[in-house]
Image (cartoon, rainbow, N blue to C red):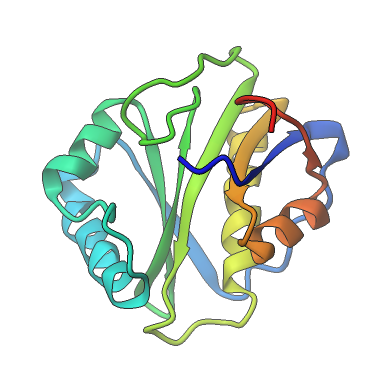
Amino acid sequence: MSQEIIQFRLLKKDRNPVLDHKGITYILVDKTNFSYYSDRLLNISSLMKKDIDWDQTPDTKEILKNRVDSNSECLLFSYNGYDIGWHWVNDNVCKDWINIDKRLNDNEGYNGGAYVTRQLERPPSAGEVVYHFTWSYLLDYKNKDIVYHYCDVWNRATSIFSYRYGFKQFNFLYDN
């Protein structure tokens, strides 16, 4: 992983309100329902390959299954009946969504790997809505008090979304 990252932390008390969902919905995919949703996740992988030149796209059922078998959960996002993206969460820091890089306390959560396709119709704010849904899932449904994530320095959109929602820079992986 590049050292050129920005690390973030959100305290539950500092978060800002969630955006209007703009008709975007999500389904939680985990080890209990992976077999039912695996083809839909592979479809997101295919869209990702069309949008992004990245050799680490999780593009096999085995890779995706390893993620959920390692207690990573995927929020699978849809709009107008079409799957448009995903965002991953875990109770520990798992940069590859399989191996634990850093154990977190029970009241802490980690998210990353957000993707929203440009191949299908979606609201212009879909990317930000996906982040807000994910952070709300961790804070409200999983009852986390602290959420961590990082993004590459070049990823201005994620940084902007993070600051708008209430995140602050915080070195939880290592000092830059």
- Furthest-right residue in this view: 14
- 43 left or right of 151 in image: left
Q: Considering only vertical position in the picture, is 140 above or below 156?
A: above
The reply to whether residue 74 is in sight is: yes
Q: Tell which of 51 and 71 is nearer to you.
A: 51
Residue at 83% across, 46% down: 166
- Picture quadrant of residue 13: top right
The image shows residue 146 at horizontal and vertical percentages of 71, 27
- 84 left or right of 8 in image: left
Residue at 60% across, 26% down: 173
- Picture quadrant of residue 78: bottom left
The image shows residue 63 at horizontal and vertical percentages of 19, 42
Placement of the C terminus among the 4 image quadrants = top right
Q: Considering only vertical position in the picture, is 106 above or below 175?
A: above
Placement of the N terminus among the 4 image quadrants = top left
Residue at 29% across, 73% down: 47
Q: Considering only vertical position in the picture, is 84 above or below 163?
A: below
Residue at 64% across, 54% down: 153
- 63 left or right of 17 in image: left
The image shows residue 22 at horizontal and vertical percentages of 62, 75
- Furthest-bottom residue in this view: 121
Q: Considering only vertical position in the picture, is 35 above or below 126?
A: above
Q: Tell which of 96 and 47 is nearer to you.
A: 96
Q: Tell which of 171 and 78 is nearer to you.
A: 171
The image shows residue 161 at horizontal and vertical percentages of 72, 59
